[in-house]
Image: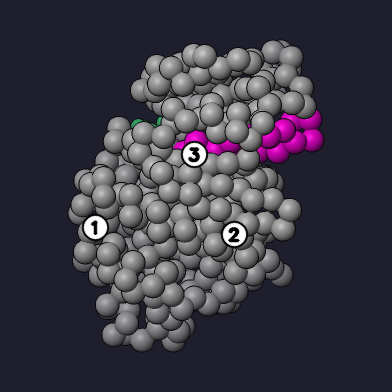
Amino acid sequence: MRKFNIELKDKKIPVLLGEGIFGKITSEIEKRKLNRNILLITDSNVNRLYRKKVENAFSSFKGKFNLLTLRPGENTKSQENLNKIYSFLLKKKYSRDTLIIALGGGVIGDLAGFAAATFMRGVKYIQVPTTLLAVSDSAIGGKTGINFNGIKNIIGAFYQPEFVLADLEFIKTLPDKEVLCGTGEILKYAYLSDRAFYRFIEDNAEKLLKKDPAVVEKAAAKSVSIKTSIVSEDEKEGGKRKILNLGHTFAHAYESVLEYKIKHGEAVIAGLACALILSRRLGCMNEEKFMALSGMLKKFHPGIKFNKLKLNVLFKAMLSDKKNRDGKIRFVLLEDVGKVLTDVEAGRKDVLLTLKEAGEFFSR
Ligand SMILES: NC(=O)c1ccc[n+]([C@@H]2O[C@H](COP(=O)([O-])OP(=O)(O)OC[C@H]3O[C@@H](n4cnc5c(N)ncnc54)[C@H](O)[C@@H]3O)[C@@H](O)[C@H]2O)c1
């Protein structure tokens, strides 16, 4: 088992990563003297696959234990499901000494984390990510929240878990489409990191999609190590953490316009292509570099029917991004692998041309 830490001023959040480590959950809870009034929140897919594993892990645990299962999918990150969690907690007489466990992908992690942040002004929680995207990215860093009025993550809180327990064995049952989504965020880390990791991902793209355990482990561990170190430096996205939004302004617009019928990770792949195209368009990246860095993305088609999209509708969706100031859209762009620019403003014309070119990019 590998251990990474998010080192904050007043708190250290361990991220435990390994294969077959879920069974350690109760001993990790005991070791940290956490509350024994547990509500485990998951979705029905994870429940179907792993209920036995959960029951086994908690069979000799002494304390209150309930399981709440929600429907899978992005629409679950809603006010309605948040209310469902609050109602369940109140009905079962949970109080401030509650420990919530988020067992699932980014949807469950974001929703259950936000419930933990807000129930009785905040109760403790643990992230147990079960998708490649959640292991490599969303379970780490304390961003929690829900979607509202069709706007992604618009209500939420920075709220750190007690620890993250990332068992790579969960990845073995992940459908191909979800592996592609996790790969989307891993590609982002490849662009943000260094040449060695970038080359590793470029060379092992097919193996990653086939869930080769050694490649999954290395890709997840490097992503976790980058994210834990960035969040340690800038927990609340005042500075360095902004780079983690590479491709995300575009990605959120694709998701919103397609009414969340495409997955976040797929949208990130399209968003990364847009970020590279806009970087070249604005002169941050030269043609040669663009050709060298964009090729990798072609191996991962995001499954979007680009020709059916209205560019001005996408642009409008981008105007409601949380990161905008004074009505101007701000982007994270790239000069080269590991050389990132934040808060770059781009005009409507450049953005529209970028969106047009992104469609052509994936159809070539
Ligand atoms: N908080 C953050 O920092 C952050 C970062 C990136 C993304 N996100 C959010 O994460 C969400 C996407 O997360 P996701 O891609 O994990 O999606 P998800 O939570 O919807 O999970 C994807 C699908 O995989 C299923 N699943 C989960 N684990 C499984 C397993 N082990 N085996 C088989 N099936 C399994 C789920 O039931 C679901 O159908 C988005 O809402 C996005 O906004 C948050």
Can you tell which of label 2 and label 1 is closer to the viewer? 2
Residue 56 vs 246, above or below: the answer is above
Whole-percent x, y for residue 124 in the image: 68, 34
The numbered mark, 2 or 3, whose residue comes first in the sequence reads 3
The residue indicated by pointer 3 is 165
Q: Which residues are drawn in magenta?
A: 113-129
Q: Which numbered disc, 3 or 1, marks the residue closer to the eye?
A: 3
Q: Position of residue 52 (x, y in %)?
A: 40, 16
Q: In the picture shown, does residue 363 fall above or below 256? A: below
What is the crowding at mark 2: few (fewer than 14 residues within 10 Å), some, or many (at least 20)? many
Q: Give the quadrant of ligand 1.
A: top left
What is the three-letter code of the residue carrying label 2?
A: Val
User: Residue visible at 47% across and 26% down?
Assistant: 43
Tell me, yes or no, whether the highlighted magenta stretch contains residue 218: no
Q: Is mark 3 within 8 Å of ligand 1?
A: no
Q: Which residue is mark 2?
A: 231
Residue at the (34%, 55%) spot, across then down: 219
Residue at position x 61%, y 22% in the image = 39
Q: Which mark is residue 205?
A: 1
Q: Specify the amino acid type for callout 1.
A: Ala
Q: What is the spatial separation of the Cα atoms under label 3 and label 1, in whole angstroms? A: 25 Å
Q: Farthest front residue? A: 31
Residue 249's disc number: none
